[in-house]
Amino acid sequence: MSDHAVRQLPCPDCGSPVQPDREQLCPRCGYPLMFLRQPAEDDARAVPRSPNERDDGTGMMPVPAPRTETRQFPAATYGAQQAAPGQVQCRRCGYGNTPARFRCERCGEELRQSRPYAVQLGPPVQPVQQRRSGLGWLIVLIVLAVLALLILAATVVWTFFLT
């Protein structure tokens, strides 16, 4: 990029003017400006290549060779050591974990059941509705009727005989 022409664009996030070729972040909102930069044509760092790799005009990377096994330990005993006293040894990788852990710190294997055990419930019990017998209400109505009659009789006696 030439020094005399500085490219200025609006920030995609806040719209304030930024210079992506000179600034890392928007000074107003902190938006990263690395995706707004123009690629340099003569920059050797534009495409990472191996030291003796030929320049391919297609721009495609060659297919890497299949990886060979690089483990130092067999998969079942990956660095297995005896667990220290008071630790729980993982069944998968052999790592010694603290007793409070539910899963292995190294491989994530479940050391103990982390969910509570299921409880078998019996069939739902239907609530028994206590039906009040009509006899109780009948007694209450009779008592109220007798009281009403007594009040009526007292009013009649008071009105006719005492006046």
Image (cartoon, grey):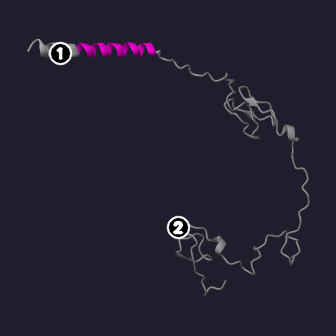
User: In the image, what residue type sits under mark 1?
Assistant: Val
Which is more foreground, mark 1 or mark 2?
Answer: 1
Mark earlier in primary sequence (1, 2): 2
- Residue at image x 14%, y 14%? 158
Image location (x, y in percent) of residue 111: 74, 32
- Residue at image x 53%, y 20%? 129
Snapshot quadrant of residue 23? bottom right
How many residues crowd around disc 2 within 10 Å: few (fewer than 14), some, or many (20 or more)?
few
How many residues crowd around disc 1 within 10 Å: few (fewer than 14), some, or many (20 or more)?
few
Residue 113 lies left or right of residue 27; in this view the side is right
Question: Magenta span: helix, strand or loop, mainly?
Answer: helix
Pick the front one: 93 or 152: 152
Location of the N terminus by quadrant is bottom right
Snapshot quadrant of residue 97? top right
Image location (x, y in percent) of residue 121: 67, 23
- Residue at image x 72%, y 30%? 113
Image location (x, y in percent) of residue 3: 62, 85
Question: Looking at the picture, does residue 79 appear above or below residue 35?
Answer: above
Is residue 74 magenta-colored? Answer: no
Label 1: which secondary element: helix
Q: Which residues are magenta?
A: 134-151
Image location (x, y in percent) of residue 77: 85, 37
- The residue where tag 2 is placed is 29
Snapshot quadrant of residue 22? bottom right
- The residue where tag 1 is placed is 156
Q: Which mark is residue 111?
A: none
